[in-house]
């Protein structure tokens, strides 16, 4: 599947420099970044679902605290 995204100039320069210095394509980095992002959100929603089953509805502040997102 082909997808187009718009990057701000600074991000584009950083991505191009990383790609050039490592020999990997910009597309490879974008795919990896998206996969990592989706993995994190899927894990977050699994954890949230487990917390909700445990206690019913819970406050988002408690979710963040229990997931270690805030101290």
Image (cartoon, rainbow, N blue to C red):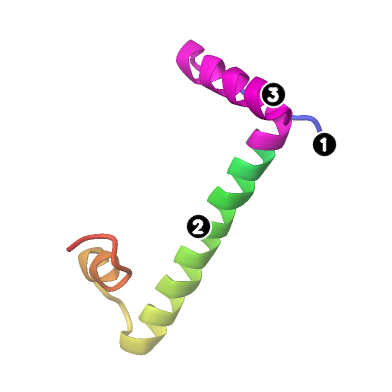
Q: Is residue 6 visible?
A: no
* Residue depicted at x 52% and y 20%: 14
State the mark number for residue 62. none
CA gap, disc 2 and disc 1: 22 Å
Location of residue 30 (image quadrant): top right
Left or right of 4 in this view: 47:
left
Indicate which disc, 2 or 3, sits on the residue closer to the N terminus. 3
Location of residue 6 (image quadrant): top right
Q: Residues within 10 Å of mark 1 (few under 14, many from 20)?
A: few
State the mark number for residue 4. 3
Secondary element type, mark 3: loop
- The residue at which mark 1 appears reads as 1
Left or right of 10 in this view: 21:
right
* Residue depicted at x 50% and y 20%: 11
Q: Is 23 a magenta residue? A: yes
User: Of residues 65 and 33, which is closer to you in this image?
Assistant: 33
Residue 27 x, y percent position in the rendering: 72, 30
């Amino acid at each position: 599947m082909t997808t187009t995204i718009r990057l701000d100039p600074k991000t584009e320069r950083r991505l191009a420099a990383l790609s050039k210095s490592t020999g990997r394509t910009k597309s490879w980095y974008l795919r990896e970044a998206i996969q990592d992002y989706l993995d994190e959100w899927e894990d977050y929603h699994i954890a949230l679902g487990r917390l909700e089953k445990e206690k019913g509805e819970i406050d988002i502040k408690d979710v963040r605290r229990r997931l270690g997102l805030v101290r």
